[in-house]
Amino acid sequence: MLTGEYLISGVALGIGKAALQSIMEPLLSLEQLWDGAILNKLTFLVAAAEADVAPGASRWVAELRRADAWEGPRAVAMRQMAEGFEFREGRAAVQSFQTAAAHFDELDVGWWAARAWLAAGEAGDNGEAVADLERARLMFESMGAPGWRERTEAGLRDRGQRWSSRGHGTAGAPSAREVEVMRELSAGRSNAQIAERLVLSENTVARHLTRIYRKLGASGRASAIDASRDLLGGDVGG
C-alpha cells in the first residue's frame, strides 16, 4: 500500500467539519488531474464519507457509484466501504463493511481489507463483531501497523475480550472444515466460489478464513494461499 494512502486514510480518523475540511482541499485538486490520480481520489472519497456527518456522507457515496462503471473491482470495494460509513452503524453498515472487506481481501489489498474488518467490528455489537475485530487485529499486527492494531484492541477490550500474539501454527491445527476451505483457497477460488462449492454462506467462509489466517500466521490472502499450499502439498481443490 502506498504511504500516501496510509496518510490519507489516517486523516479520516476524525469525524466532523474540521476533518472534512482537511480532506476537501486535496480532493478538489485531484479533480484537475487525469486518471493517474484516480486511486488517490477514491481514497479521499472514502475518507470524506467517514469524516462527514449524516446525511452528508451520501454525496461521497454517489461519487463512488459513478466510478464503479469504469474503475473496476477496487472502486466497487471502495464504494461499499463508503456505504458502510453512510449507514454508520447497525446491520446494514456491518454488511457493507464485510462485503468490502471480502472484496479487498480477494484483491489482496491487505490494509484496506483490515480497515474494512475493523469498521465492521466497530459498527456491530455481537459475537460476529468480535470475530471481525480479531481478524483486523491479526492483519494489522502482521503488517506492522501498531496504531491501527491498538485501535482494534480497544474495540475488543470494550467487548470484554482478551487476546495474545500468535505466530505460525500456535493457534492449533486446522479443523476438518477449515482444511476443506484451505483446499478451495489454494485452488485460487473466491469467497463466493468457495461458499457455493462447500454449500456455505459467504459470511461463514469469511469466519473460517479468519481462523485459518490466525492458525497460519497469514496477514492476507496471498500469504494464506502460499501457506495453505505448503501445508496441503498437492492436495488442493480440483
Image (cartoon, helix red, strand yellow):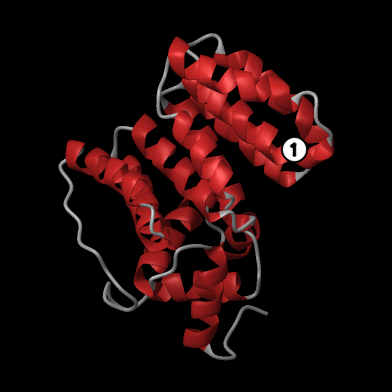
Check the image and report above or below for 71 versus 216: above
The residue under the point 46% across, 43% down is 115
In the shown orientation, is residue 19 left or right of residue 214? right
Q: Which amino acid, mark 1?
A: Ala
| Residue topped by disc 1 | 37
The residue under the point 42% across, 37% down is 120
Q: How many marks?
A: 1
In the shown orientation, is residue 93 left or right of residue 70? left
Check the image and report above or below for 188 versus 99: below
Secondary structure category for the residue under label 1: helix
The residue under the point 42% across, 36% down is 119
When asked about the image quadrant of residue 128, the answer is: top left
Residue 203 x, y percent position in the rendering: 49, 49
In the shown orientation, is residue 154 left or right of residue 215? left
Residue 129 x, y percent position in the rendering: 34, 40
In the shown orientation, is residue 87 left or right of residue 43? left
Report if residue 214 is visible in the image.
yes
On the rendered image, what quadrant is the C terminus found in? bottom right
Residue 199 x, y percent position in the rendering: 56, 59
Question: Tag 1: Cα neighbours inside 10 Å, few (<14), some, or many (≥20)?
Answer: few
Check the image and report above or below for 230 versus 192: below
Query: Nearest the camera: 44 or 102?
Result: 44
The residue under the point 62% across, 19% down is 25
